[in-house]
Structures are given as structure tokens and as C-alpha cells.
Image: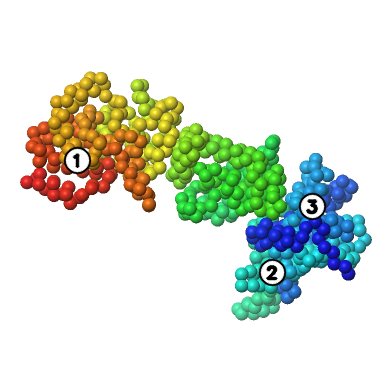
Amino acid sequence: MEKKQFQAESKRLLDLMIHSIYTHKEIFLRELISNASDATDKLYYHAMQEGKTGILRDQLPITLTVDRDARTLTVSDHGCGMTAEEMESNLGTIAHSGSLQFKQENDKQEDIDIIGQFGVGFYAAFMVASKVEVVSRADGAETANRWISDGADGYTIEPCEKETVGTDITLTLMEDSENDQYSEFLDEYRLQGLVKKYSDYIRYPIQMEMTRSRQKEGCDPEKPEWEEYKELTTLNSMIPLWKKSKSELKDEDYNNFYKQKYFDFEDPLRHIHMSTEGAVTYNALLYIPSHAPMDYYTKNYEKGLALYSNGVMIMEKCADLLPDYFSFVRGLVDTADLSLNISRELLQHDRHLKLIASGLEKKIKNELANMMKNDREAYVKFFQAFGLQLKYGAYVDYGMHKELLEDLLLYHTSASEDMVSLAEYTERMPEGQKYIYYACGETKAKIELLPQMELLKEKGYEVLCLTDDIDEFCMKMMHAYKEKEFKSIADGDLDLESDEEKEEIKQLTEEYKTVLDGVKNALGDKVTGVQLTSRLKSHPCCLSAKGMVSLEMEKVLNQQPGQEKVHAERVLELNAEHPIFDKLKTADADKLAKYAQVLYAQAQLIEGLQIDDPVAYANTVCELML
């Protein structure tokens, strides 16, 4: 029998395809099952055209058969089969696809899903097999043919006998090596797992004889004996949940699917079931979890949605379908419109993928906004788990996504026990309030004790309480909400004084210039300036900052490993109405310097900053007490 050579490609190309295109050897089973599904679809379609209505899909199984002794795995189907000429064309020419040709010829038919397009999936078998044998009998043919190849050296085709129409592909697996254990593909449960992972929603039953155990008949019940037996088992569920009508499904169905697929013990907060037609057609089933995974805020977390093509999983986590700020969403997308590369494992990032991602982004945003409006308790639970990610999303890329995300943000405030949105804050701003005021601190309780809060409370202004490290960076990047600028209460100028108060402070500053200069000289370059303020009521002093870097930003940035130390331009503000200032006015130069050091250290402590020299501070306090 003459051995023929592959017509289109060389041994080098086949070698490259087998060892480079597919990154996971287990993919071979997905490819062979998909090819079997395509062949069965063709038979079913032709039968419908010819009026053969007695053929049912559940009577056209795809069967896996394992022979551990011979080290063979066989994938059998009852599809359209191949003639010798079709074997020559489809198997003898790498990258020739009968499925693609069939799809092009019958492009207008809706009830036919052809998965294979590029004709190379079959050759993935050579990643695990030293020899591949294909026995096929075409629909309507009296005889069958056998195609055999052991790789790039070529193949043979000869007539043979086969009782039924369809194709049997038998792989003789390679011997195990130190790096590769090919015997795993002879294990029933490993094969079952691969079918569930990649081919669970193939529309035809995928069957295999599974080993079960049962108690022997007639044995002593007190000393039971067990025996193994084989049972033909359907491995796949066949009907994707996301392709069912919403009217068929209950919340329980969605929740059970989520918990089984993602191994979660809690129901999700929301599910989103989409079926979209138009420029791109796809089905999607998305979930918003009720809690963050343990690794969510670590570099080990991998975002992405499962991507299916006609029920066959082609990527377990497609990161391009979700923006980082919605990376908490779990779920899947099923479409036949994506352009796939020849491995079906990597995506050609074309306009279809971008259109799907854009559609998902809008749907997720709308679902979150709806939850905030109509189920506030659930949204607060969501925000406590994933709000930090939304804040990062509003900050990164120079605030490019702030308009999309700003209405989803929640904050604690000085005037409410409940978290409020920016829209709710601005709606209840009193007339005349120019800015959206915020303050940073470790907790809301500590923020409310800040000296600067007294004046805001006196004027009836609500203050956003920011407790996350990212918060102030986010505020700086967003700059404003609905034309209302954000302003930190630690800023040097809050623009809250009347003209009379400003004039009074100006006069007092001129009158006590010697005192202020003395405090500044005592503190040196620790502060940029020392000034009187009218913002303080019961407190003697506070720290404010000039420039782009605030005191809170200084703290956060200096906590980063390897970060060069940054310093905010600090200003020590003194309350001219406080009894302590009377002490400063009458103190000699030595005592004034000690007062200055103590006041500055106290202002640092109030802001949550570290004291430069705690020992010197303690000694100075003791000296002043003597």
C-alpha cells in the first residue's frame, strides 16, 4: 500500500502546529468531539432536507471508547462520514475544512451550528497520539475507508468494512515520559472531566462506559461483597442554560448553576441573562457575586468570562470581555460571530469581540445602577465587597471612565449613618455651598474629630468621609461631579470666610507677625508657613497643605515599598481666639520655640501622621509642665 504525503504543508508545518499552536494537550479531545458534532449536524441537516423526520438528535450519540491494554482512545460518531476522496481532501490537506465549506454553502440555515472552520483541529490528536486511525463510511455509501497516519511522514488510505454510517477515530497514545503522562487520557474520570469542561453543551449526547460498583447479589448482608460493572453514561448536559428562554427559568435555576459552576456557597446578588442580535449575535449569562473571592485584591486573581462558540468552550477566561473595574463579574458568553484563529484557543481581537465587550459593559453598569436604586441593601453589600475596584476604575487611565462609574460610588458622610451616592449628596447641598467637601482618615469616627470639621458642621455642610487609600487620588482625578468641585477640608483655602473675617485675619496677621515668624523659625523647613485661621473653633491649631500633594496622599505614597519619600507643603494654622495663642503672644523666644514644637507635633497626631522625634516631644511637654 502506497504511503501518500500531505499535499499542502510540510513536516515542519505539522510539527509547528502540533507543538506550538495548542498550549494544552487536553484540547485534542475538544477538537475531535467538535468535529464529530459537525459531522452529525451535516447528517441531521441533510436528513431534514430529504424529509426524514424520524431522526432525533438524542439517537445520534458521540461515543468515547477506552482500551487501556492497547493504549487506545476512540471517538465515534453517527455523522455524515467521509468517502475516500473526502478523506484525501479533508485529512490529507492540512488547513482544508469541510465544515467551513458546508457552512458557506448553507449560510442562511438557522438550525445548523458548525463549529470547525479551519480544518486543523483534527491534527491536535498528534499531540498525544503516535498513530491515528480514521475509519469512516459516508452516508449513502456501501463501503468504508481507513485512513492511517503516524505523523508528518504521510498517510495511507484503503477500503475496509464498517457496518454503520459515521466515523471512528482511534488514537494510539504515546508512551509516558518524565514530562508528559499520556496515560491520563485513558482514565475514565479524566475524560469525563474534559467533556464537562469543554464540551458540556454539545447538542448530541457524548457517551462512555463508566466503571461503577455494586453489591454482589446473594452475598451475606453482614459481609457485603462488591463488584465492578460497566454502565453506558451520558457525560454532557447538552442544553445550555443560557440558550433557554427566560420564561422557562427561575431564580433558583440561575443560582444553582452559579453555585455549581463557581463553587460558591452563597447565591449571587444578581444575574444578567442576555440574548443579543444585530451587528453581533451572542448569548451571555453574567453574575454579580455577593462577596469577593479571597484572592480578588491580589495579583493572583484572574479576571475574565468563559467564551463559548456554539456551546463549545474555546477560552476559560477571556479577559478582553471585561474591563478591570468590572472584573468581579463572573459568567460566560456564547457566540458564533467571533473570528477565531486556527487553534480556536486564541482570539483574533476583531470588532465582534469589542462590540460584545461594549454591550456587556453597558448592561453591567445599568444592572448595578438599577440595584442601587431599587435594592439599596443588596447594593451596599455589593459595594462593601467591590466598591474599591470601582474607585480604582474611576482613577486609572487619567479618569477616562469617571463618567461611567461616578454614579455607582457610595460614601459615608458626616450627616448620615447610611452610605450616600454623589447624586444624593449634591441634591441635599444647601444653597450657597460651592464645593463637595471631603475629609480623609482611618475611620469615619476619627474624621469627625478633625479640628477642621467644626466649621463645616457649624455651616450645615455635609462632608464625605473617605477611609480608603485610593479615595483622595480618585477625587483629584475626577475633579468635580455635575460641575461641583471636590475640596478637601484640609486644603489651605476652603473659601468659607466672609470678607469681614478675611479682613480681621489680615489685621491680626500684621499685628502678630513677630509671633508667627518666631513659630516658623522654630519649626524650620518642617512647614512651608505659619498663619492665623478662622476655620478653627475649639482647637488651637491644625495642619493644612498647599499644592497637589495632600497630607493624606503623602501618607499613602510613603507606605509604598521602594517609593521615594514625598512631602506635602505643610502649613501650621493657629487659632487666634484660643487661650493657647495668648500663651504664644507673651512667651519669650525659648518658650515660644518649645510651644511651637508641641503644637506642631499635636497637629501631626491629629492628622494621623508620625511625630518626627517622639522622645524630644515627650521631653518638651515635661519641661513645659515644670
Disc 1: which residue: 523
Observer-side mark, 1 or 3, equals: 1
Disc 3: which residue: 97
Pinpoint residue 126: horizontal percent, then vertical percent.
73, 64
Camera-side residue of 471 and 79: 471
Residue at the image position 23 percent from the left and 41 percent from the top: 526
Q: Are marks 1 and 2 in contact (CB under 8 Å)?
A: no
Disc 2: which residue: 186
Judged from the image, the secondary structure of the residue bearing numbered disc 3 is loop
Residue at the image position 11 percent from the left and 48 percent from the top: 622
Does residue 544 show up? Answer: yes
Label 1 is placed on what type of residue? Leu
Residue 120, compared with residue 186, is above or below; it is above
Classify mark 1: residues with Cα within 10 Å, few (<14), some (14-19) or many (20+): some
Pinpoint residue 256: horizontal percent, then vertical percent.
59, 51
Residue at the image position 79 percent from the left and 53 percent from the top: 96
